[in-house]
Image (cartoon, rainbow, N blue to C red):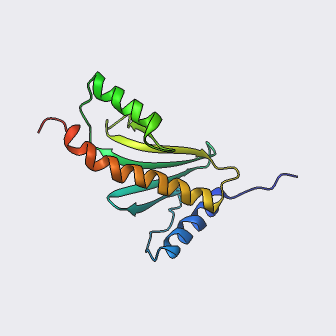
Amino acid sequence: MDEVVDHKASVARFLTRFGVERNLTLPPLSPEGVGSIQRGSAVVTIHVLTEQNVLLLLAKVATAPVLDAAKAARLLTASFVETGDAAFALHPQTGDLYLRILRGLDGLDYAEFEDLVHSIAQSADKWDDRLAAELAGPA
């Protein structure tokens, strides 16, 4: 018989443990399955999407950047070789640039959760400052 896993509860425990291990006071995972962690200049938003059976981690790196073909190609290349588990993505409504990680919820354990948070936070902390001036839209 298959065991039913409460993924929101699991990720809530992971988030609490992550904070305790680092002596951080983090807001608990919301009833909707959303939480956040700040690491350096990066704010990582955690979304437990139970209907899609997906964990989504997002870190905003630029607000509505102006992208020409060369800049877009650079970001796609960086997604492939420089961002670890994360990839660049444009928010469909705002046009803001994010790093994102998607991972299925089945089999997720604390060590992998911790690794994913570190991976996206390190990449976002590196790229947000680097891209702020470079991709800024008109003032």
Asked if residue 8 shows in the view, the reply is no
When the figure is inspected, residue 46 is found, relative to residue 12, above or below; the finding is above
Residue 112, how many percent across, how many down?
61, 56
Tell me which corner region of the image, top left, top right, bottom left or bottom right, holds residue 139: top left
Residue 24, how many percent across, how many down?
43, 74
Apparent side of residue 73 relative to residue 80 in the rendered image (left or right) = left
Which residue is depicted at the point 53% across and 53% down?
116
The one nearer the camera, 85 or 12, is: 85
The one nearer the camera, 13 or 114, is: 114
Residue 64, how many percent across, how many down?
26, 38
The one nearer the camera, 57 or 75, is: 75
Which residue in the rendered view is the most extreme toward the front?
Answer: 81
Apparent side of residue 70 relative to residue 110 in the rendered image (left or right) = left
Apparent side of residue 51 relative to residue 70 in the rendered image (left or right) = right
| Tag count | 0
Which residue in the rendered view is the most extreme toward the right?
Answer: 1
Which residue in the rendered view is the most extreme toward the left?
Answer: 139
Which residue is depicted at the point 32% across and 58% down?
41
Residue 118, how many percent across, how many down?
48, 57
Which residue is depicted at the point 58% across and 65% down?
14
When the figure is inspected, residue 74 is found, relative to residue 20, above or below; the finding is above
Asked if residue 133 shows in the view, the reply is yes
The one nearer the camera, 72 or 6, is: 72
Which residue is depicted at the point 19% across and 43% down?
133
Apparent side of residue 32 relative to residue 92 in the rendered image (left or right) = right
